[in-house]
Image: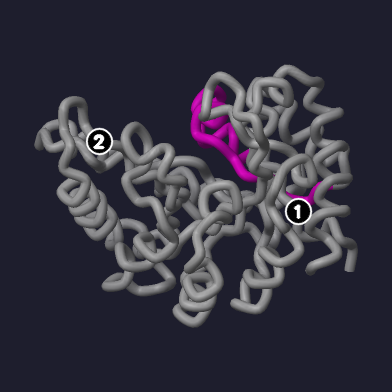
Amino acid sequence: MSHLSRLSLNQATIKYADLATALSVTAGAGIDAIGLWREPVAAVGPAQAARMVADSGLRVSSLCRGGFFTAPSPDLRREALDDNRRAIDEIATLAQAGAPGSAPVLVLVAGGLPEGDRDLAAARGRAAEAVGELAEHAAGVGVVLAVEPMHPLYAADRGVISTLGQALDLVADLPAPVAGVVVDTFHVWWDPALPAQIARAGAQGRIASYQVSDWITPFPGDALLSRGMMGDGHIDFASFTRLVRQAGYTGDIEVEIFNQEIWDADPGQVAARTAKAFGESIGPGL
């Protein structure tokens, strides 16, 4: 089996490419799967996006992103839930259109603290309630809700769920085929409880997605754009991937990088660079 056989190029890594370009450069780099984002899908419409995915011959590894559940306002909460139900339907359609092995996984980012709010526990509670409310709809169309813990750096403005353990606690009362977690190297590599929590996630059948990018220093000016290509930073991908493999995860591995320099580069060159870095950093551990 090729070291690239499980590689998926998440569209965030080639942010400025439209859907047609993203599909083309992914296949052109010898990559068999793509992680889609809702904005490029919306630009052509879900039905046309599904046709394009089918024509590409690529697997779909996930759709990013849903979530943002923490607003206390009933009206904003209802809007968020309605939008997430649309996202659930979108990934169900896209995964069905993808090549065999496509995964109907919707990545969920909890959302940060509402403006002026300092109650982390309440925000986390609202996120958990929202995932629970969406579970029935997701189960009805065969979609997995994948809660992504985010590095504590982003707890205030993006993700109040900060550790893999917190994410697993959030989905604990829901069936594993409906609700799981995203293991993202950038967000959780630092956690001293990581080995135990990855093992826990595997034992419960909760690993819905494995995403990789590196932790680079010094940070650029915008902390959001601080991810690096594998091998350019501090993460031990061989050990990390071994943990995920031992936990039983056999799905696609998405490279998801937020980095202005990479975004500004030619998407075809980025796809080729991604395949090379994946083969060197991730492939040997598979």
Pick whichever, 227 or 60, lies toward us.
227
Residue at 69% across / 23% down in the picture? 263
- Badge 1 amino acid: Leu
Residue drawn at x 87%, y 37% is 272
Residue numbers of the magenta segment: 31-51
**Which residue position holds label 1?**
7
Q: Position of residue 174 (x, y in %)?
A: 30, 70
- Pick the residue in front: 217 or 116: 217
- How far from the left and from the top, in percent, is residue 60? 64, 50
Q: Is residue 146 above or below residue 119?
A: below
Q: Is residue 127 left or right of residue 182?
A: left
Element type where label 2 sits in the image: loop
State the image quarter where residue 276 is shown.
top right
* As drawn, 195 above or below 126: below
Q: Is residue 222 magenta?
A: no
Measure the C-alpha gap from mark 1 to mark 2: 34 Å
Residue on which disc 2 sits: 113
Q: Is residue 270 above or below residue 234?
A: above
State the residue lying farthest toward the bottom: 203
Q: Secondary structure at mark 1?
A: strand
